[in-house]
């Protein structure tokens, strides 16, 4: 049972953005302190074993070092120290993640920092106590590794609670530089006091981490719910909206969350209780999650390389002359920080690129591939001059630490909150621990092997590092290939950047701007090539692009312009916004998924992704709307005929989801309610809209509103006939005197509405389908709940949206303005709007054709004018 502790006394009226910044700074400082306390062993290696570190120096014979690390076996014993620390660290990592899912993370993290500080200082105290027994130093390193293993699962889990997926790459790329910043800080501190005795190099970092741990204990807030904010995990679960695979509206500040009035907050409390009651995910179950094992083994070899540099780089610099001169202990330690500075920029770049492309594995593979030649260059030419050494060391750190930082931060958080876990946010620390724990096994192996291999020459060490990098690439190459195949690479670059320039991205705008400027020209040229390739494929195989244009017998027929040229390739951009309106409770919900198959672990489609968007307007409670939102996409993907017979699949999925909800209500009667549902799916150039209820979808075609769905209300004649044939009736405009809609999912608790059988009841969950082939004239699709259409006509909504897109071309902002305008016009219901654009550019401005009006005057009129002038 998870222990719940009171949150620290943060100011209660601060915005969500303020608290997100606070959490980032606190966790950044915490893990930087962890890494700073790990750095001293690498700095003092050349002091503990000077006979090796200065083998070319005449002073070597005079200084035996610190027994038992001096002499010819010194490197072996130094490697054993690293092995002791990293072995216990990797073993403790698995245990820490398991425990972290079950107790309060703030207490657990503070405990780890206190223990790490004490054990680090204890190692340094061996200098004053005159200890020369190897067993003492090994024991201290083992204890230190166990305490250090607590840090990473805790800080990643906390950050994962506060930030959604859409910006994890960039935010965690910047935040993940805490490792490199900690390394730099530890190197500078340890090197600066080394001349006063190597013990100080351990004591000061130990004190530092204890002080930072006190701040963490006093001020860290583990979860937004502790302050009354809706947690990001819950927000993703509730909205599933945004860009990328699934992106949430994580840019809302504390005042915007005011939409959650008393009813909404009570719902969140019940959801929190449900989440707390879930058992934390098992260790073996977490290993079986998609992509966890490949990333874990990739990190095994990536971390082997990174930690070899972490523990042996100052030693390597001290032993190898730069420009013909051996550097001092202090200079070598400070110079080694250049590698970590490169790692800072590498982590930020990897995070930004993976966010822009949405391709974590491909980004990691590219960085790993470039790291191999950078290692060769550093080994071959790093000793020529100081400037060349610094430049090549920076380049090596950039490419080595980039994927290491990405996998341990954004990738770990993504995998720990993926949909296979179905909302179990308590699994995040376990998955994080598995990935980083497996990497830590490699981290233990690398420094140990280096201690033995370095006696044969450093060329052998670099060969081992390059071999490890190659193996890391091998574990990710299949995932990277699948990502590249199923993703429209350049389209994602161009659409991801503008939709991220809000909220948090203002903090990192300078980083984004510099990277965009360097990539701008290249991407603009490649996008033309990408579009040309897709056009050629479509022309060579038109059956592929048109295979989803079949209209089934239940589909509302719309002219799809079969003779339209097929060289149009839609580029999908989406946005969403919702508001509680004048109600005291929120029953609307929505979902935006750019790649339905990828989200639910379906085998990659060969050419195209299936995009899925939906609006669900609940009534009688929010249970049905949330159930359909969470389960309908999954049911669609799990259908045996997905994605080939998409119309039949969607039809069956609506009915199956409705039946599943009926079974759920028999167990949880509190969920009894109903919901209308409208979904839109895009596959290639095909658009399929399914509607059951009074939500509505409207397509803009060159500024003309095309209705893509029919409202299922009691005033519809065809619906009246269907209802009467099934024994229902219309009374005062309500179905059986109870509902204003004639089709909906749920409502099984209402007597006489539904029957389990072939005929069913008068209230049907069967959707009406509309399918068309998109052309270059189709601009965007608006999906809205009935609250929008109470005050907007179809054409009015299209005109309003076109004008806003022409002004700023921001889809999400356009949705917000549409909802706010509906409120100004007097809408009283809950309001939800989802927009899907099919072009990168805003809609073209239309010019009205002016007809020529002949100007003439009759004879009588001419006489009247003359008389007027004469008078």
Image: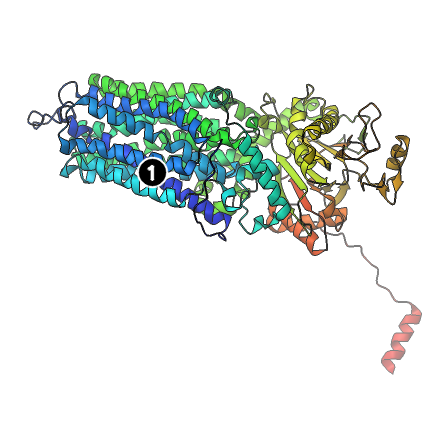
Q: Nearer the viewer, residue 721 or 428?
A: 428
Is 314 rendered above or below residue 809? above
Q: Nearer the viewer, residue 779 or 669?
A: 669
For label 1, the residue is: 32
- At mark 1, the secondary structure is helix
Residue 474: x, y in percent? 43, 18
Question: Taking the image as drawn, is residue 180 in sight?
Answer: no
- 751 left or right of 131 in image: right
Q: Nearer the viewer, residue 640 or 209?
A: 209
- 156 left or right of 375 in image: right
Residue 148: x, y in percent? 33, 31
- 687 left or right of 218 in image: right
Q: Quadrant of the C terminus?
A: bottom right
Residue 654: x, y in percent? 73, 29
Say which residue appears at 25% left-offset and 33% top-offset.
120
Say which residue appears at 20% left-offset and 28% top-offset.
45
Q: Nearer the viewer, residue 430 or 414?
A: 430
Say which residue appears at 49% left-offset and 29% top-offset.
427
Is 812 rendered above or below residue 658? below
């Amino acid at each position: 049972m998870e222990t719940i502790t009171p949150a620290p006394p943060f100011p209660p009226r601060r915005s969500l953005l303020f608290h997100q910044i606070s959490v980032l700074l606190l966790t950044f400082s915490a893990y930087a302190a962890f890494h700073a306390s790990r750095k001293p062993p690498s700095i003092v290696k050349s002091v503990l074993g000077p006979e090796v570190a200065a083998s070319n120096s005449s002073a070597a014979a005079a200084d035996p070092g610190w027994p038992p690390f001096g002499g010819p076996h010194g490197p072996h014993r130094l490697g054993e120290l690293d092995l002791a620390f990293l072995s216990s660290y990797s073993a403790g990592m698995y245990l820490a993640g398991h425990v972290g899912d079950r107790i309060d993370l703030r207490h657990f993290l503070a405990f780890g920092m206190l223990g790490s500080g004490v054990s680090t200082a204890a190692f340094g105290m061996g200098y004053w106590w005159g200890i020369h027994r190897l067993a003492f130093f090994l024991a201290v390193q083992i204890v230190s590794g166990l305490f250090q293993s607590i840090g990473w699962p805790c800080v990643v889990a906390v950050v994962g609670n506060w930030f959604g997926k859409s910006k994890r790459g960039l935010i965690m790329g910047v935040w993940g530089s805490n490792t490199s910043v900690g390394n730099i800080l530890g190197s500078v501190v340890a090197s600066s006091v080394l001349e006063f005795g190597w013990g100080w190099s351990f004591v000061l970092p130990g004190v530092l981490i204890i002080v930072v741990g006190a701040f963490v204990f006093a001020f860290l807030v583990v979860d937004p719910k502790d302050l009354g904010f809706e947690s990001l995990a819950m927000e993703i679960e509730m909205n599933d909206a945004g860009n990328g695979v699934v992106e949430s509206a994580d840019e809302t500040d504390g005042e915007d969350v005011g939409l959650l009035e008393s009813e909404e907050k009570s719902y969140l409390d019940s959801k929190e209780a449900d989440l707390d009651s879930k058992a934390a995910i098992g260790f073996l179950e977490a290993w079986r999650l998609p992509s966890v094992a490949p990333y874990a083994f990739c990190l095994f070899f990536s971390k082997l390389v990174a930690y070899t540099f972490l523990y042996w780089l100052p030693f390597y610099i001290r032993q190898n002359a730069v420009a013909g001169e051996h550097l001092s202990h202090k200079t070598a330690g400070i110079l080694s920080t250049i590698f970590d500075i490169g790692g800072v920029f590498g982590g930020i770049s990897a995070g930004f690129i993976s966010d822009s492309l949405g391709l974590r594995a491909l980004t990691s593979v590219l960085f790993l591939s470039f790291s191999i030649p950078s290692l060769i260059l550093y080994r071959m030419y790093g000793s020529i001059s100081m400037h060349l050494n610094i430049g090549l060391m920076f380049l090596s750190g950039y490419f080595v630490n980039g994927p290491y930082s990405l996998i341990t931060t954004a990738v770990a958080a993504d995998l720990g909150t993926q949909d296979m876990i179905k909302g179990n946010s308590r699994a995040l620390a376990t998955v994080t621990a598995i990935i980083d724990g497996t990497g830590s096994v490699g981290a233990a192996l690398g420094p140990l092997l280096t201690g033995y291999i370095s006696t044969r020459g450093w060329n052998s060490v670099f060969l081992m590092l390059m071999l490890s990098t190659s193996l890391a690439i091998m574990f990710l190459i299949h995932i990277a290939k699948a990502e590249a195949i199923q993703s429209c690479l350049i389209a994602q670059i161009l659409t991801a950047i503008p939709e991220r320039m809000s909220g948090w991205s203002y903090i990192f705008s300078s980083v984004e701007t510099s990277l965009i400027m360097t990539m701008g020209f290249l991407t603009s040229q490649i996008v033309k090539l990408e579009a040309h390739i897709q056009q050629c494929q479509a022309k060579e195989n038109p059956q592929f692009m048109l295979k989803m244009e079949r209209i089934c017998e239940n589909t509302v027929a719309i002219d799809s312009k079969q003779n339209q040229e097929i060289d149009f390739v839609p580029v999908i951009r989406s946005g969403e916004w919702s508001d509680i309106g004048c109600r005291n409770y929120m029953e609307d919900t929505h979902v935006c998924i750019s790649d339905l198959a990828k989200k639910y672990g379906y085998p990659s489609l060969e050419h195209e992704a299936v995009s899925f968007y939906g609006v669900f307007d609940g009534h009688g409670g929010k249970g049905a709307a949330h159930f359909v939102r969470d389960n309908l996409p999954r049911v669609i993907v799990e259908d045996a005929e997905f994605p080939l017979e998409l119309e039949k699949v969607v039809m069956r999925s609506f009915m199956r989801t409705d039946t599943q909800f009926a079974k759920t209500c028999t167990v949880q009667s509190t969920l009894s309610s109903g919901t209308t549902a409208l979904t839109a799916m895009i596959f290639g150039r095909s658009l399929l809209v399914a509607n059951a209820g009074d939500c509505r979808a409207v397509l803009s075609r060159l500024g003309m509103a095309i209705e893509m769905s029919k409202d299922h209300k009691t005033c519809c004649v065809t619906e009246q006939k269907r209802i009467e044939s099934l024994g229902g009736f219309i009374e005062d405009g309500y179905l059986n005197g109870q509902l204003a809609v004639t089709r909906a999912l749920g409502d099984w608790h209402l007597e006489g509405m539904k029957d389990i059988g072939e005929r069913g009841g008068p209230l049907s969950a069967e959707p009406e389908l509309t399918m068309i082939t998109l052309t270059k004239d189709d601009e965007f699709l608006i999906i809205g709940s009935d609250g929008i259409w109470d005050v907007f006509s179809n054409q009015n909504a299209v005109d309003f949206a076109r004008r806003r897109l022409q002004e700023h071309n921001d889809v999400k902002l356009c949705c917000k303005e549409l909802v706010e305008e509906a409120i100004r016009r007097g809408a009283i219901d809950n309001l939800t709007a989802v927009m899907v654009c099919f072009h990168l550019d805003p809609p073209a401005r239309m010019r009205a054709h002016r007809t020529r009006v002949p100007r003439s005057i009759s004879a009588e009129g001419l006489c009247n004018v003359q008389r007027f002038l004469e008078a």
